[in-house]
Amino acid sequence: MNSAIHFRYEVLRTLRNRVLYGVTLALPLLLFFGVASGQRHATFNGTSFPLYFMTAMAVYGSMFAVVGPGARIARDIAGGWTRQLRITPLRARTDLTAKVASAYLLALPTLALLYLAGASLGVRLTASQWLEMTGLILVGLIPFVVIGFVLGYLMPVDALTPGLGGIVVLFSLFGGVYGFELATSGALFDVMKALPSYWLVQAGKTVATGNGGWPAEAWIVIAAWTVILVPFAALAYRRNSARA
Amino acid sequence: MIPDTAPEGGIVLQHLSKSYGAAPAVRSLDLAIAPGETVALLGPNGAGKTTTIDMMLGLTRPDHGTISVFGVPPAEAVQAGWIGGMLQTGAPLDHLRVRELIALTASYYPAPLEVDDVLRLSGADAFAGQWTTKLSGGQAQRVRFAAALVGDPDLLVLDEPTASIDVEGRRDFWHSMREIAGQGKTVVFATHYLEEADAYADRIVLIARGQLVADGSATEIKARAASRTIRGTLPQGDTAALGALPGVLAADRHGDAVILSCSDADVALRALLAAFPAIRDIEVRGGSLEEAFMELTADLGDTTADVMEVAR
């Protein structure tokens, strides 16, 4: 049993899915330059607009990247090869790990490209700040990986692409990813702050202001989404295995 | 460390039952398969063949009864790489070429065969560079066959392996299977083609409505059914009246020729001569496997025998 080979082929399958580049790389880059180039000296949310929107678009593309394994799972199930895999010594855990790792691998070039784009519009951070932001984003994406799994196991494959896309768009809208915030106080703002996407977008500002990462609230929100969603994913997985 | 080669013990199914809702798919099946045997699970569609195979592969959990594959439960035998399975469906993983998919599958097993050898043996070498999403039904079938073989399993379980392959492809497939079975592997295959069961299995397990109705070599099953055919020339004579004669299961007419399938040919022949003295060119033959199958499943009271297909 060689899980490295399985991982290598999962990466290969991810890289060969050209459509994925569109939403994870091209779309956020286009939106970034389209919106931010006219506002490179504007301030927003207590920081420079390019920094805010660079972070937002990096989050946008990488959210699409990490829900990808869900779509892959749904396609593999619909095609029937998942049953074939179940009669080989490959463990489901190895398969899932490889899918998540390959999705994260796709998220990294999204981050790198958006950082470069941001730098070209004047975003300046120290090396440790870039790294810290990357770390925060990679952690904050975990709930989205799990959302991808839940939907991948539960939704029929033909409904999955609009389903996952819709979910990412909703989280983006309420998280302030599109360059505006639906509210800055009140009940709606409380809802926004309860979403992992909101805190993901704040990652840029957080590292730039240098007050030691996210507030505790952000960690609690991200941990809570993960802890609540993981049992759902496990249940969805078991339901699927029982049916298959 | 799990050994690469399965220990002795064969495959044992005991009192195996599985229902889907209220519909029983397999009913108290007992079966023991010795290592190295090639066994056909023969039965009409809906007989419970696929359910039995899914349980042997650990894909479906039985409601009652136990399965032991080389002394361990199916899931453990699968984990050890002792089982290779070919399912009826399964679109090969996308964004891969055929060779890549087989190489990937090989990587799951402790001691796989050479990918090139497997591609050749399964007949998938001709399209090894093709994208897996661009395969015909027959090509996908060969890819599934290659995936089942590549781990060099001790037990090969095949569910309707030739269902979407043309006649020529079928011959190639069974040629390869002979080669593989000759290496001492245990092979269990489900089929509703009588000819395949007759030609390629050491032993036929006849299943109808989830129950085992006969178990033995093709010759034994024919003998057990004790079915005989009487043929003769009879220009006049009501076919229905022929069918109603004692000892006759069914009567068939082709022009002047009549063919009677008999449960008791001796009784039938005496009655035939008494009722239709004009009959000539009489010939009494041992039954075919097809007729044995019809007879053995006849008392199950439905049209199972009618849906049998015969490979031509």
Image (spheres, rainbow, N blue to C red):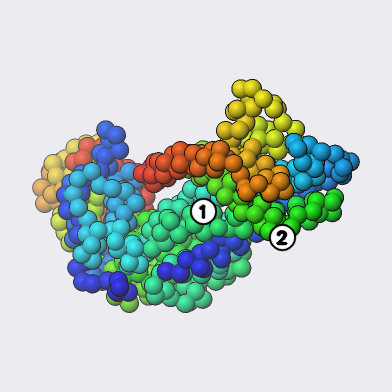
Residue closer to the observer: A4 or A182: A182
Quarter holding the N terminus of chain B is bottom left
Front-lying residue, B139 or B130: B130
Marks 2/1: CA distance? Answer: 46 Å
Residue B253: percent from left, percent from top: 31, 44
Which element is circle 1 on? loop
Res B30 label: none
Label 1 environment density (alpha carbons within 10 Å; few <14, some 14–19, many ≥20): many
Q: Residue furthest top?
A: A186
Towards the viewer: A137 or B36: A137
Across and down, in percent, residue A102 comes to: 58, 58
Check disc 1 and give the amino acid type: Ala
Which residue corresponds to mark 1? B91
- Residue B186 vs A234, above or below: the answer is below
Rendered image quadrant of residue A177: top right
Q: Chain of mark 2?
A: A
Name the mark nearer the viewer: 2 or 1.
2
Percent across and percent down for residue B125 are 55, 71
Query: Which residue does the image show at 55% across and 47% down from the upper left?
Result: A142
**What residue does disc 2 label?**
A127
Residue A92, picture quadrant:
bottom left
Report the quarter where the C terminus of chain B lies: bottom left
Q: Residue at x 59, y 61 (%)?
A: A11
Q: Residue at x 24, y 53 (%)?
A: B206
Question: Please, what is the three-letter code of the amino acid marked with disc 2?
Answer: Ala
Residue most toward the front?
Answer: A211
Q: Is residue A213 above or below residue A185?
A: below
